Amino acid sequence: DVKVTQSSRYLVKRTGEKVFLECVQDMDHENMFWYRQDPGLGLRLIYFSYDVKMKEKGDIPEGYSVSREKKERFSLILESASTNQTSMYLCASSPRDYSQSYNEQFFGPGTRLTVL
Amino acid sequence: AQSVTQPDIHITVSEGASLELRCNYSYGATPYLFWYVQSPGQGLQLLLKYFSGDTLVQGIKGFEAEFKRSQSSFNLRKPSVHWSDAAEYFCAVGARYGNKLVFGAGTILRVKS
């Protein structure tokens, strides 16, 4: 069974703290994604990575950075957390197979982050 | 740029009734279209996808969707809703051989007994 895991289901942090959200996939996928989910806005892409040490900005990268040192692990970093970063964060992964026209994204259960 | 509109934020249907969730997209080329479902406290699960060919696609859990190019729509349907279908549903559009998806805002489905 394919699996994407996220380090925490719920997290509470204080304004100004540095926050790490971890995501691990066991499917040997090349692509990994971080989304933010807010009511009425759907999922918005923060960053994605198509290979180890490679990253690309998504639609809302401001205030976030990412790290991908190993293929299976993709970290989202909030350098200085702010209250407007209170949200649900979803990680996803997908294979990169150019013989197929599309490769399904597999999602983790999400981390609900509250910044006080 | 790609975009997706789900006009209904909330929908309530009675158990056993039929369901249709609306999705309209904007994309310059042939779109790749998806419906995902998110049960409470869970990640997203793919229900079905459309790439090409037959415009009526079947998915898991008894769902189907119809691609209508002339209306730029990809509406999700189910003939008889079960209480376990209560969840949030997301429509998404992607590009061929692309890595990224653009999601709609989601529709929350409530099922009443």
Image: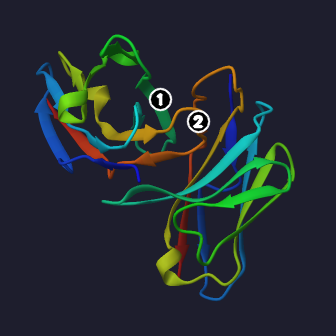
- Label 1, label 2: how far apart the Cα atoms are: 8 Å
Residue A109, percent across and down? 57, 45
- Judge the density around disc 2: few (<14), some (14-19), many (≥20) Cα neighbours within 10 Å: many
Q: Is residue A44 left or right of residue B21?
A: right
Query: Which quadrant, please, contains the C terminus of chain B?
Result: top left
Q: Is residue A27 left or right of residue B62?
A: right
Kind of element beneath mark 1: strand
Mark 2: which amino acid?
Gln
Q: Is residue B21 left or right of residue A50?
A: left
**Res. B79 visible in picture:** yes
Residue B66 figure quarter: top left
Determine the residue positioned at 24% across, 36% down. B72
Chain designation of label 1: B
Residue A3, percent across and down? 69, 33
Residue B24, percent across and down? 24, 41
**Res. B39 visible in picture:** no
Mark 1: which amino acid?
Leu
Kind of element beneath mark 2: loop
Image mark count = 2
Determine the residue positioned at 56% across, 84% down. A82
Residue A49, percent across and down? 72, 51
- Residue A105, which numbered label? 2
Residue linked to disc 1: B46
Q: What is the image's colouring? A: rainbow
Of residues B14 and A93, the one nearer the viewer is A93
Q: Is residue A76 left or right of residue A110?
A: right
Asked if the residues shown at circle 1 and circle 2 are in contact, with their CB atoms under 8 angstroms apart, the answer is yes
Relative to A12, say whether B14 is above or below.
above
Chain designation of label 2: A
